[in-house]
Every structure is written in structure tokens, then in C-alpha cells.
Amino acid sequence: MAQQDQGRQSAARSGADELFQALRWLMASIDWKSIALRKDCTWTAWKLACTAILWTWSDEKTLGERFVTARKIICFGRPRQDEPATSYQAFTKLLRKWTGPLVELLAQAFRAKMQDVLPSHWTVAGWFVLACDGSRIEVPRTRGNEARYSPKSKLSRAAQRRRTRGRTKRRTAELARQRKANIPSVWLTTLWHVASGLPWNWRTGPGDSSERAHLLEMLQVAPAGALITADAGFVGYDLWQSILASGRAIAR
């Protein structure tokens, strides 16, 4: 039994080391100077980014357990004085503040690695092709999700309640249907690198967001001369003119 336990521990250490090295490889070119954490903070930008990635990948049941597992991997083989704080609250507080800048740095590093390691899967018939599409994802009906991801209605809930006072049951049923339609959902618009099948960029918003507006926001990270391909939902003279004026092409 002791030998089996040692074998499991050895395998766990080996897996942690492989994950650790993979993350170091991915992030080797990132300059973290723009992430200005306090001098007395035990977290560094690199540790925060790595822990956040492993935290989302973990299959533990709770977010707290995921954090414990991710932190263990980050601490593997490191001196105790280099270990970040064990507070889950401190970790999430840092993430709330720095998620945007961290995601941008990681996305840039990921795109650079794609070009370095996939030179034979970079273009299609001489074109750098990006496919764009959007999809709606329902999320739990929490207050935070409702505030951020519910479709924008013409009337506030308070106004809707005032208008329905003294009205018929039919009006009450109509309001119930409207509220059901306002279930929060995330609209995710993604640019895919066609040659490799990997994501290039993305935007999120409420369930009634415009995927065309998301595409226009993402044009700045599409290489000059890129060919944008999309389905019939990406229509309109203004959209196509903006794409062509940016130095990219479009195919439908």
C-alpha cells in the first residue's frame, strides 16, 4: 500500500510539474510590468494568471476547492517564502480588478504562440481566414447576472409594476411572459482562426447584444489583409464598408 501511495504522489507531482512547465512555456514572452500589484502583495501577476487558468480548468465541486487545487500546483516545487497567500477572498478580489488586463496579455501571448508553432496551419489558400459567429448561453438567475446580462427592456420593473396595478389578469400574465423572456443570458461572439480551428478573439454581452457590433470591436486584432467569413446574420452596408475600410476583406 505504501508503494502505491508513493506512486500516486509521484504521478501527481509529475502532472503538476507538466502543467507548471506548460504555463511557463505559454507565458514566456509576456511582460507583466503593466500589472502593478502592491509591493507587499504575495501574489505576482504570473502566479495570479496561472492560478486563474487552473482554477477554471479544475473539476472540483466548489470554487473554493478549485482554488486550493490550483494554488497547490502553482506552489509545487517552490520555496515556502514564494508561495502566495491562501485567502480565496484575496485571490478573487485581485481577479476582479485585474481580469481585463490579464486576459489581454494572455490572448496576445496565445496568438503569438499559434503563429510560432503552427506555421503550416496559418493560412488557407494564401488567406489568413477568421470565421465569426455568435451564440447565446443561459446563466443562473442571480442578481448580478440579471443586472449585467438580462436583455434591456423598455420599462423598468418598477414602472412595469405601476402600470399593472389594477389591470386585468391578462395583463399580469403578459408581464409574467415578459419576465420569463428576460432570463439572463450571455451573448458570446467569437472569431475563430480557420486554419488551426483555435479561437482568435471574443466578446461577451447581454443576450440581446449585437454580434455585428462585437465583430467591429474585434477588427483591431485581426491582421491587416485578413479575410473575415461569417453567416447571413452579418449583413448591412455599414458593417461591410467598415470591414473593407479597415483593410480586411469579407466573405459570406
Image (tube, rainbow, N blue to C red):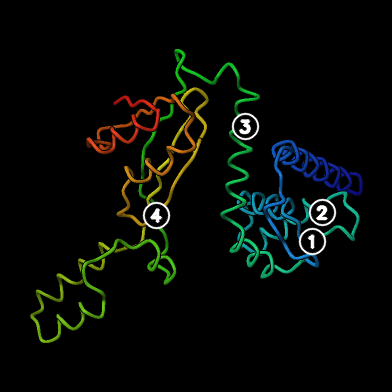
Say which of marks 2 and 4 sits in front: 4
Mark 1 or mark 2: which comes first in sequence? 2
Q: Identify which residue is drawn at 33% across, 27% down.
A: 250
Q: Identify which residue is drawn at 40% across, 64% down.
A: 148
Say which of marks 1 and 2 sits in front: 1
The front one of 30 and 185 is 30
Pointer 1 local density, CA inside 10 Å: few below 14, some 14–19, many at least 20: some
Percent across and percent down for residue 233 are 26, 37
Task: Write down the quadrant of residue 158 in the picture.
Answer: bottom left
Mark 1 or mark 3: which comes first in sequence? 1
When the figure is inspected, residue 72 is found, relative to residue 201, above or below; the finding is: below
For the residues labelled 1 and 2, say whether their Cβ atoms are less than 8 Å apart: yes
Tell me the kind of residue under disc 4.
Gly
Dot 4 lies on which element?
Answer: strand
For the residues labelled 2 and 4, say whether their Cβ atoms are less than 8 Å apart: no
Tell me the kind of residue under disc 3.
Ala
Dot 1 lies on which element?
Answer: loop
Q: Which residue is mark 3?
A: 112
Percent across and percent down for residue 235 are 24, 36
Q: Which residue is mark 4?
A: 205
Say which of marks 1 and 3 sits in front: 3
